[in-house]
Image (spheres, rainbow, N blue to C red):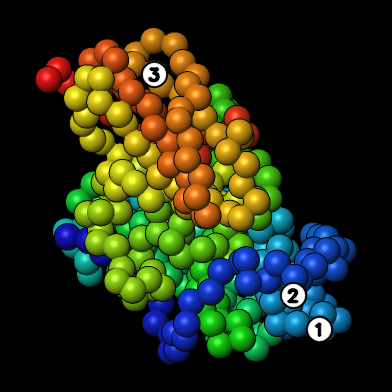
Amino acid sequence: MRFVFVLVVFFSVFTRGQRSEFDHINFKKADSIAMLHNGASLKNLPVLTHKLTASLQTDVQKFRAIYTWVSTNIENDYSAYLTTRKKRKKMVENREAFLEWNTSFTPKVFKKLIDDRKTACTGYAYLIREMASLAGFNCKIVNGFGRTPTLRLDSESTPNHSWNIVEINNKSYLCDATWSAGHVVLEENGPEFQNDYFDGYFLADPNLFIKNHYPVDINSTLLTPPLSFKEFIQGPVIYKEAFTAPIIPLSPKKMHFEVLKNEKVSFSLQVPNDFKKENIYLVFNNGGSDKKVIPKITLKENKCTLQHTLEKTGLYDVHIKVDNANVATYVVKVKRK
C-alpha cells in the first residue's frame, strides 16, 4: 500500500511549458538580487518575497529570484529525510498511525526550516509554494517518487520526494528546488550537505522531468498521455547532466534489454538545435574496465541516433556520455544466436 501526506490546494492546470520558452530572458538581475539577500531571515516571508521580486519586471524573473534564493539558502536536512523514510516504511500498512506521527513531526520540520534554514524536500516545496503565492503565483506542492542513479524503485516503493508546479503566464511549469540546491555526501562523521546550485531543474521540460520524477497525482506529469508508473521504474537511469542541454532519451524505453551477438544496439535521443555530435560517445563495461566507443552517429533535426555492434556475449552497462558527463545508463544482455 502506497501512502503520502498530501497538501490539498486549488490549482488550475493550463498548457504546459518549459525553460526554453524563456531563452530570451536574462536571469542575471534576478540571480543577483537573490545573492544580495543571501542569508536573509525566513521569519518574515512577505518582506523577504517583496525584496526579491519588487524591482523585477516579468513574472518569470520574479519566480526565478524566489527559486534561486531558496535553492541557494536552504540546507538539505538529510537526518529529517531518513527519519521520515524510516517511519513511512514502518507504518506503510497503517495509514492512520503515519498520519498521526506525520502531524506531530511536521511542525518540528518547519520550525527547523524557519530557525535554521534546514529542511527535507517537503520543506523546499513548501517554501517555494508559500513565497510564490505571496508574489501572486498559483503554485502547488507535488508529492511523488524521485529516482536517482543510486536510488532504485520498484512496484512496492513508497513516495519519497516533493517538488512544485508553478503557473506563469497561464502555463504550468515543473521545478525541483531540492535537487537544484546541492547534494548530500556521506562522510565518516555522518551525512554532510554540499550546496552546489544546479540550474537544470528550473522550469524543466516535462518530457525529461518524468524520467526521474513521478507524481502520485498522474495529472501533475503535465503530459498527455502520461507515462505509467511501471514504464517509469523500468526506464533508463537519467543523470542531472541530461537536464543541462536538455537531452531526452527516447529509446530504448526500458533500462534492461537484450540483443543478439553481432546485432546492432541502437539508442535514440532528443537533442537541442545546437547539439554537436562529436561531443557524444558510449562507454561499455561488462564487469571489467570501461571501454570508450565512438558509435555510428546519425543526427537529423533534433534526433540523435547511436548505433554499435556488440561482438561478444555478456552483460554490459552502457553509459551515454556527452562532454564527458553521464546522461543515461542502460543494461544490455548480449545473447548467442
* Side of 71 where 9 appears, left or right: left
Which label is found at residue 223? Answer: none
Task: Compare residues 174 and 109 and report the one nearer the observer.
Answer: 174
Which label is found at residue 61? Answer: 2
* Side of 288 where 98 appears, left or right: left
Q: Residue 268 appears in which quarter of the rendering? A: top left
**Which residue lies under the disc numbered 3?**
285
Say which residue appears at 29% left-offset and 71% top-offset. Answer: 225
Q: Residue furthest top?
A: 288
Q: Residue 40 appears in which quarter of the rendering? A: bottom right
Q: Quadrant of the N terminus?
A: bottom left
- For numbered disc 3, what is the local secondary structure? strand
Q: Earlier in the sequence, mark 3 or mark 1?
A: 1
Kind of residue at badge 3: Asn
Say which residue appears at 30% left-offset and 39% top-offset. Answer: 255
Evaluate if marks 1 and 2 touch, with contact meaning CB atoms under 8 Å apart: yes
- For numbered disc 2, what is the local secondary structure? helix
Label 1 environment density (alpha carbons within 10 Å; few <14, some 14–19, many ≥20):
few
Evaluate if marks 3 and 2 touch, with contact meaning CB atoms under 8 Å apart: no
Label 2 environment density (alpha carbons within 10 Å; few <14, some 14–19, many ≥20):
many
Kind of residue at badge 2: Gln
Kind of residue at badge 1: Gln
Q: Nearer the viewer, mark 3 or mark 1?
A: 3
Say which residue appears at 22% left-offset and 29% top-offset. Answer: 259
**Which residue lies under the disc numbered 1?**
57
Task: Compare residues 236 and 95 and report the one nearer the observer.
Answer: 236
